[in-house]
Amino acid sequence: MRRYPPIAEHGMIGDLQTCALVSSDGVLDFFCAPRFDSPSVFASLLDHDHGGYLRLAADDADVQCNSRQLYLPDTAILITRFLSHHGVGEVVDFMPLNRPEQASGRRRIVRILRVVRGTVKFVLECRPRFDYGRAGHELTLVSDSAAVFRGPDLDLQVQTTFPFHREGDDIVGSVTLRLGETAALVLTTGIEEPSRPITVAQLEDEHEATTRFWHSWLRGSAFRGRWQTMVHRSAITLKMLTYAPTGGMIASATFGLPEQIGGERNWDYRYTWIRDGALAARALAELGFVEEADAFRRWVTERLRDTRHACGEPLQIMYCVDGDPYLVEEELPHLEGYEKSGPVRIGNAAAGQLQLDIYGEAVWALTQSRELAEVSGYQGWQTLSAMLDWLKTTWDRPDEGIWETRGGRRDFTFSRLMCWVAFDRGVRLAREYARPADLDGWTTTRDAILKQVIERGWSERRGAFVQHYGGDVLDASLLIMPIVGFISPKDPAWLSTLCAIEQDLVTDSLVYRYDPSAAPDGLRGSEGTFNLCSFLYVDALARAGQLDKARYAFDKMLTYANHVGLFGEEIGPTGEQLGNFPQAFTHLALIFAATTLGSELERRSERGTRPHGRPW
């Protein structure tokens, strides 16, 4: 067992209320329960010695053993294969989905062991560490195959079909299986009393039910273009990052994973950002998953009607998955951090920041389709209209911007751009559906924002739109300008901006968000290239007609996916994945890029044109 496996060496399983990461070593090293944003039970990914883990893997003490991971196609069921000279064994991991829309403290992880060749010995270690490793627990052995760990606020039951024994306050065991034999382990949280003994036959039935759920859900996809496997894997990932009881979508499954090894940029992403959730909802809706987009629309509407906000605005940038606005940030000094990258943080102080772009993303995502407009009804329109009436007099303010910098407020171009989007889409919707609205006021505000961005967001020296007014720093967030229709993708001003971004922020098709040395963000250290921006770059190239260049960049980006098609937040200097994992931002942008590029390639094919020259 490695102390710190690479971040990318993990697959994710989930049940639409929480999720877990399983390394290619067969170690469940990250799990928070009963919700995404609950305290961790296993977090050895952040501290090998004190975080806790559940290991169920082939015993490789006496023989060389390699491992491989894959998903059962079109599902969230993860298979870890162990290959040795003695045999080939598999651990099948999944979380059953039993009425995921009803919030419950009872979560289950099923791990089925089987041997498909020869003989394999599997070993078990279960070492939970409750409350982020801050609390002790009591262990009760119910039998030689059932145990209950009692923490301060959560009980954890482990059941197996093979014997184990106590080792201090933890349990260990082993089982040897031959060709065709199976065994199993079930981990359950939130139990009131020990459950009945488990059987492999019962768990195989749950495996089949979970398979049917994911296959049935994915049949709702309308995507039939290129890169279907990667697009559908991204869709499943976004679905797994959705809290079904409320419809809130979290930004990532984890907290504390570093943007730079040994650095301090270690944040908690297990919350629902208005921006990330709205864009994820839009990506899913583009694929045909309107129910998920509608659930998020209802979640946002409830936030707009809620008067509890830490920032004093109609919306704050992020919330707990149930809509609670209070996310107190704290450091966990007892945790070492991934590869000694500290401090490890939970909560997020950025919740109190002012980021005006969130209003644009919310309106853009939730007014994109006729279905969403119709189901929102008149009450939904009134809520949206009231928000735009408020924004009409408050948009022209400095804020902290999309990247949540801690270096002070500025007049960020991206924030003004997305305020333009809010009014532009609001005006369109009011006209299309003949809804009551201050059309004159909204239209005047929309046009004033556009004029301000054109005049003050443009740098003559750089020949480009820049990060903030009065500066010359470039920012990759502006790659979204042609996507939202602010500017034509072939406008000379935009092509000049795209060229400047390529010169300053693009390296081998990978894109940095901005240059911290040129625009200090209040934090020490650096970071990797940002995967969201790399996929937005592909989208921008495709819209600009640079299809060969876009396709080459997209194909190169796909090589950075991990072995099961997942992406983190960033790519490091040697191609390693960095930041919290997996990242909704990355997967939604992959969907945007694939749909745009695929459509443009299809149009070129229909025109009968041929590519010229080599890919850039």
Image (tube, rainbow, N blue to C red):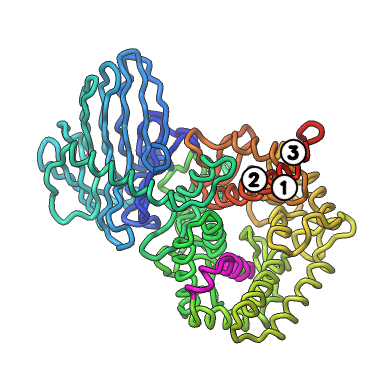
Q: Secondary structure at mark 3?
A: helix
Report if the CB atoms under discs 1 and 2 are less than 8 Å apart: no
Spatial separation of the CA atoms under disc 1 and disc 3: 8 Å
Spatial separation of the CA atoms under disc 1 and disc 2: 9 Å
Q: Amino acid at mark 1?
A: Ala
Quadrant containing the C terminus is top right
**Secondary structure mainly formed by the magenta segment:** helix
Q: Nearer the viewer, residue 493 or 472?
A: 493
Spatial separation of the CA atoms under disc 2 and disc 3: 12 Å
Judged by depth in the image, the label closer to the viewer, 2 or 3, is 2
- In the rendered structure, the answer to whether residue 441 lies left or right of residue 164 reads right
Q: Which mark is residue 598?
A: 2
Q: Which residue is mark 1?
A: 542
Judged by depth in the image, the label closer to the viewer, 1 or 2, is 2
Image position of 117 with respect to 111: above or below: above
Residue 256, given in percent of the width and then of the height, sits at: 48, 48
Q: Amino acid at mark 3?
A: Asp
Tell me which corner region of the image, top left, top right, bottom left or bottom right, holds residue 577.
top right
Report if the CB atoms under discs 2 and 3 are less than 8 Å apart: no
Q: Is residue 492 magenta?
A: no
Residue at the image point whose x is 44% and y is 37% from the top: 10
Chain part drawn in magenta: 356-376
Residue 522, given in percent of the width and then of the height, sits at: 65, 57
Q: Amino acid at mark 2?
A: Gly
**Mark 1 or mark 2: which comes first in sequence?**
1
Q: Nearer the viewer, residue 187 or 473?
A: 187
